[in-house]
Amino acid sequence: QVQLVESGGGLVQAGGSLRLSCTASGRTFSNYSMGWFRPAPGAEREFVAVISWSGGITYYADSVKGRFTISRDNAKNTGYLQMNSLKPEDTAIYYCATTRLGVVLTTIVGRYDYWGQGTQVTVSS
């Protein structure tokens, strides 16, 4: 059974930082790209960032580019989202997900087949 478990969320003041973790079990983590998403008005989930299976390619939403960094440690079956210069509008539940086999990089929710339960990030002004 595949499981993704996020951690690292919390309450932080605007301008602060948090690092989210996503630990996978039940599948060979290094075979799959991994993404981070959050809810958005008018959409179930909004793309935040994605990283390829090897970690060599990353892609970000414009809203977080330059502030967030996605990374992974395949030896630990864990992915990360380093969030700096946080803004109140970053407040959300953050979900990690792994793509379907063969998908390299995608922003499309439907191309991810396993999701974590989410971790709450709250940024106060």
Image (tube, grey):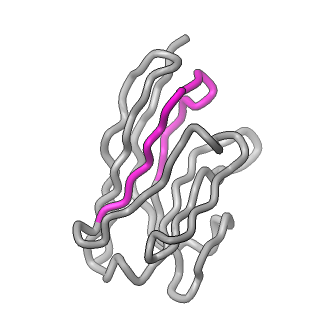
Q: Is residue 93 magenta?
A: yes
Residue 95: where, in percent of width, then height? 47, 51
Question: 32 or 112: which is nearer to us?
Answer: 32
Residue 105: where, in percent of width, then height? 61, 73
Give the quadrant of the N terminus: bottom left
The outermost residue toward the top is 125
- What residue do we see at 48% from left, 38% from top? 83
Task: Note whether 53 is above or below 23 in the view shown.
Answer: below
30 left or right, relative to 107: left
- Residue 112's quadrant in the figure? bottom right
The outermost residue toward the right is 42
Question: 65 or 120: which is nearer to us?
Answer: 65
- What residue do we see at 31% from left, 81% from top? 27
- What residue do we see at 55% from left, 11% from top? 125
**Region in magenta:** 78-95
- Residue 62's quadrant in the figure? top right
- Residue 66's quadrant in the figure? top right
